[in-house]
Image (cartoon, grey):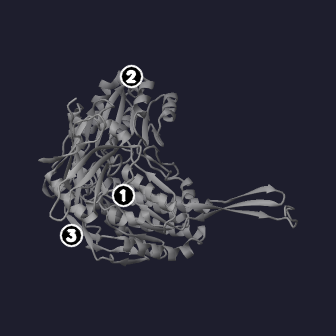
Amino acid sequence: MTVYANPNTEGAIVDFRSRYDHYIGGKWVAPAKGQYFENPTPITGQAFCEVGRGTAEDIDAALDAAHTAAKTWNKSSATERGAVLLAMADRMEENLEKIAVAESWDNGKAVRETLNADIPLAIDHLRYFAGAIRAQEGSLSQIDDDTVAYHYHEPLGVVGQIIPWNFPILMATWKIAPALAGGNCIVLKPAEQTPASIMLLMDLIGDLIPPGVLNVVNGFGLEAGKPLACSPRIGKIAFTGETTTGRMIMQYATENIIPVSLELGGKSPNIFFSDVMDADDGFLQKSLEGFAFFALNQGEVCTCPSRALIQESMADDFYDLAIERVKQIKQGNPLDTDTMMGAQASNDQFEKIMSYMDIGKQGGAEVLIGGDSLDLGGELSGGYYVQPTVLRGTNDMRVFQEEIFGPVVATTTFKDYDDALSIANDTMFGLGAGVWSRNGNIAYRAGRDIQAGRVWVNNYHSYPAHAAFGGYKMSGFGRETHLMLLEAYQQTKNLLVSYTEQPQGFF
Amino acid sequence: MTTILASRPEIPGEDFSRVAMTDETLELLQKLRGIHGDLMFHLSGGCCDGSMPMCYPAGDFRTGAQDVLLGTFELPATDALPTAEIGFWVGKPHFSYIRGSHITLEVVDGRGAGFSVETPEGKRFIMRSTLLPS
């Protein structure tokens, strides 16, 4: 067990600057309007640094820097881009513990997750795209004996990326790695709830990236995100967040006719078929862990398995074991490596989750465990802690249909396969899903019948590079974490070349 | 929590108010429309800041055939501003789940969400719900 000291206190392994400017053109640049906003840690609710409150002027400055850098970066070799990504990964690995603690402090999540998931995955992601771009090939097609069609991958130029707060560094890396590998320059806006850890990262890795290739401007959505999304000077806008903002980003993109990628959340079903209870063995334990995964990252995951569907014939026994597993979730100081669930990311997030607890109870859902906030005492009393909560009800209840984005799972039972699939697909979302069965045929069929972009079969919440991630239905479109994303950050240039010396004979 | 303003019904055939706001919400909206002009709400679904009411300059979010106008607030005039209307919208698929609920718009301290206009004030609109009499 390790308990990390709070950043900026005695014995801390990482300290934040007291104030972060924007990172533009390889330098720290003060906001044009000279304004900053305070950034609190959700762990205690206390502000620990200030960050730049960016405006359209700052976005313009970042776009200027990006377009200047694009003149050379857009034409850089795959070798050069790959080398930059690998150097970023190595530097992050050398500083993994520091970055992990900083991420936990900025976001509130348990440090055991940032140490073992967020940051290692981010590092691997950079390495994956460093390799992918080296291996990418264009194509040529011989149209006829004299004519050849060559297909080249060209960068889009400069792209805009708006990052969510639930995995600030990992989600940024999911977008940065393919965009840089594809030869683009970036203007990136972190979420206003978690603006600091990315800046701390830029402090560590900025010198490895040619100036202007990656620019980071903080600020509020309205003041900085909107001018970025609306700008005619970006070739693409990528966004992870919620549906209304996603629709707005698409609306803005229509004005410039640029591509958009959207990842917009879910209400992911996690289906437990009766055979998981056929033996008291490792597989059963794994399934119970799969149920408890709704508590990963305090439930602040777009793919949170927030609806558990349990086959009726074994439901009583399964519920007993599942609740017992949830009871063992240890809450406490997120900087303690034994803590399994940390703080919700912000006060408004906390308030929203509590409002849905209320909606669930009013709507007739039974609270099997949890259902309330949690006061951890001492300095943690100012933080935003919620108990892991299991509700039981029916799929037509609001808590089964609206994304709570907290450690709350809505559970119900199903009779047979058809019933399970009908409940699973009765949602406006289609991002993730889980299927648990010892029967390969059932698991396969369910995996294919669920309308979601990522179905975990006999596992959950694994996010390796080289497995495509993205949504069906209202969960958005576009895929991440796979080399197919390279093409989403590239144009296709076709050179259609005639090698004949003879005229065509038309005119 | 004191609700002081109820929305006008907008759904054809309905004669009851679906959305109300607290005095603190009204106060913040009066301040915001002094900065941004006329405003509108759209209830978001999904992900990080989802299931939250988003407040935009009127017309900034283009509503369409897949949206339902739940109600319209008539904001009283202030010393500086005339009366104004604020529509509260929700996506049609989302409406089917909240149609049994009455919504109260409240204000909490917060750090933001999307492009909603209140976030630079360090405030966040949130939705509290009660069941409508069936």
Residue named by callout 2: A415
Could you give the CA–CA distance between mark 1 and mark 3, rounded to whole angstroms?
48 Å
Give the mark toward the camera: 1 or 2: 1
Tell me the quarter of the image containing the N terminus of chain A: bottom left
- Whether residue A322 is visible here, answered yes or no, is yes
Query: What residue type is disc 2 on?
Result: Lys
Residue A15 drawn above or below residue B99: below
Task: Residue B60: give its label.
Answer: 1
Task: Residue A10: give its label.
Answer: 3
SS for tag 3? loop
Residue A22 drawn above or below residue A392: below
Q: Is residue A349 left or right of residue A489?
A: left
Circle 2 chain: A
Marks 2 & 3 on one chain? yes
Could you give the CA–CA distance between mark 1 and mark 2, rounded to whole angstroms?
46 Å
SS for tag 2? loop
Question: What residue is rendered at 43% in x and 71% in y?
Answer: A215
Residue A202 drawn above or below residue A358: below
